[in-house]
Image: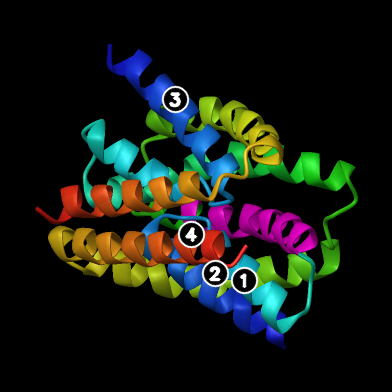
Amino acid sequence: MKLALIGLVAGFMSALFGVGGGVVVVPLLILLVAYTPHVATATSLAAIGITALAGTITFAIAGEVDPAHALLVGLPAAAGATLGATLQQRVQARELSYLFAAFLVAIAVWLLV
Amino acid sequence: MTLALAVLLGFTAGIVAGMFGVGGGILFVPTLIALGLGQVEAQATSLAAILPTVAAGTWRQASYGNVRWKPALALGLASVAGVLGGAQLALSLPEDALRRLFAVFLIAVAVQVAWRARSR
């Protein structure tokens, strides 16, 4: 029941913003289902596979998916994510996270103006 | 040029996503907008770009034994109903309203990232 509710919210956010939904799923799995962060992240990833596939098909039917760009960005990103996950084990600087948060806000400002 | 830039931006987005534990999508959308796509097109294409990243990530995590498959399946299947609603809303909103909404979402994620760093 909790899982269905989390899935429903995650799917809505995912399709509305074009993201996987891990940002909502991971904290909710930790808070509501008492998963450890590692298990929550891994389980969220597997679930997002289904969510993103459903979203891709829905938007593809509406003619909004650009497959060439998806591959151009998605394939290098898959390689990059592996490297990033490895780096995460070594770099734990709090300042880096603040920098990233500031960077996200900067993108938001760029999109707003 | 655009080709090399797309590959470079995608790779960078992947590294950053992996490092900070956010999905690729939050960075794919602005990347695709920078490459000239419209807001809805960027979001839709981001979802397709997430697929290889998620496949690679899941495969890695499964090898560590971290994936709970049944709950993941339940979550994923329940999310399909949410996807249909979210897609309907995304397609019906004007592009600039959706862009502003996405910007607000980015700020919310930024707050979450900073909060997690603070409470660590």
Q: Is residue B36 above or below residue A58?
A: above
Residues marked 4 and 1 touching at CB (< 8 Å): no
* Residue B113 badge: 4
Sequence-wise first label, 1 or 3 = 1
Q: How many marks?
A: 4
> In which chain is the residue bearing label 4?
B
Q: Position of residue B23 (x, y in %)?
A: 54, 50
Q: Residues within 10 Å of mark 3 (few under 14, many from 20)?
A: many
Q: Nearer the viewer, mark 4 or mark 1?
A: 4
What is the spatial separation of the Cα atoms under label 4 and label 1, in whole angstroms? Answer: 12 Å
Q: Position of residue B113 (x, y in %)?
A: 48, 59
Residue occupied by mark 2: A24
> Which residues fall within the magenta stretch?
A37-56
Say which of B22 and A21 sits in front. B22
Which comes before the other along the chain, label 2 or label 3? 2
* Residue identified by numbered label 3: A72
